[in-house]
Amino acid sequence: MKRSVKNTVLLLALTFGNGGCSFFNVDDTVDPNSPAVESVLTNASRAQLNQLGIGVQSATRNGLSNYYLVSGSIGREVYNLASTELTWTTELLGSMSGGLSPTTLFNGHYADFSQTRRRAEIFLRSAEQSNATAPDALTEAQKQGIRGFSNTVKAFVMLNTLNMQYQNGIRLTFSDLATPGDLLKPGPFGTYEASLAAIKGLLDEGAAQLSTAGDDFAFPVSVGYAGFNKPATYRKFNRAVAARVAMYQQDWVGMLSVLDESFLDRNGPLTTGPVYTFSTTAGDLVNPLFQALNTTNSPVVAQNAFVSDAEPGDTRVARKVTRRTTPRTFNGLNGVYDASLYATNTDPVSILRNEELILMYAEAKIQTGQLAEAVTVLNRVRTSAGLQPLAIAKPAVIGNKDALIDELLNQRRYSLWYEGHRWFDVRRYNRLDQLPNDAPNQRVYDQLIRPFAEVQWDAKNPQ
């Protein structure tokens, strides 16, 4: 693990990789001298800071496919019918004795998210300690922008990691990058509750920093953040992520408060929000979630109940899955529908959009007893999907809190399908036993196992 972390740290300032022109709509700035990390941390030029910022944004896409596919499989949204890797249809679905292996491939996202977190930390510290002189010197407002951006990125990937690790918790801190000899020492793990509190703290700190960051960021911002590419508008994204945290904390009043500061628009387009972008440009990435229809090479298929449980006329089903010409049967699983959220390998992937914010708003309204308002916004999502308002389709749920929670979770199931939500939604409502199993020996896990490398890292560096 030490070697892996050391190599990662060295790569952060040198080869962020994959910030192609189409992703950022700018030319990458290349440092011809390939400076050491220490140089970037203590004396970064404006060009090097730009490169660091670009690298952080590019890295946020890393781990995405593993995160969605693993959580989607455990949450019984999709199955990866990979004939070359049986653990997707055995170990991950709980049909192997002994449970998950500590060296499992299912924690691939863990290293990616941790590396992104570290990149964001290096970006922040490099800006803090930059000695660049005019005209390259950063103003205090520009430093605030980098602080707010970096803290938001760190919080975002930490939350994703925590979702998968759950009661295992996550590392609350890394060692101080400015302390010689401490670069490879791990920070402590916090409980689930402490981890959520730490993430919330980072987001709140980031929001305050973005509030005093001036009109523009001091580094190029990805075209995927169009509409959220300035400190004031990026802060709205920060508050949207904070709403997710409040949701997991069951802080419904706090959730409504941060939603008011986000880009929530109860009557606006559901698709509004930042996206990950992809391209076939050399050095960039293609969409890892795209797959050709009817492939027999590790097809990702929908768990069939996604189609059979849907309300008649729900247009989200046809937008998200496509019936295979020949069903794929493998290892006791029958794949009738391909996951087809993306038509091409350059389609963007939503990071967080207004549709999710509306559903979070509805949930908070239900939980605070404001049921009529919850019905109004749930109808906004229903009618956009071709369904009748609740008063017509399901009149019995009107005024019934428990029934409205059922409806809310169902709308999240169909609106946010295969986007890293279903498993966590049923878990936070203690409904894991309601997820379907397609074989009698399957079971649904409540969390992934802590990576073996992390255990070994602690063993070699006792607190």
Image (cartoon, grey):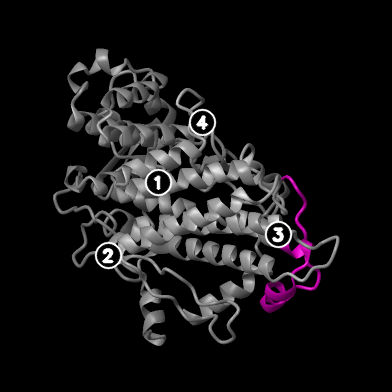
Residue segment shown in magenta: 25-49
Q: Identify the residue under disc 3.
A: 140
What residue lies at 50% left-to-right and 77% top-to-bottom?
A: 175
Tag 2: amino acid: Leu
Q: Nearer the viewer, mark 3 or mark 2?
A: 3
Instruction: Classify mark 1: residues with Cα within 10 Å, few (<14), some (14-19) or many (20+).
Output: many
Q: Nearer the viewer, mark 1 or mark 2?
A: 1
Instruction: Classify mark 2: residues with Cα within 10 Å, few (<14), some (14-19) or many (20+).
Output: many
What residue lies at 64% left-to-right and 64% top-to-bottom?
A: 123
Can residue 289 be seen here?
no
The dot on residue 244 is 1
Query: How much space separates mark 1 and mark 2, taking CA atoms?
Result: 27 Å
Dot 1: element: helix
What residue lies at 41% left-to-right and 80% top-to-bottom?
A: 457
Q: Does the CB distance between marks 3 and 2 fall below 8 Å? A: no
The dot on residue 100 is 2
Q: Is 128 part of what is drawn in magenta?
A: no
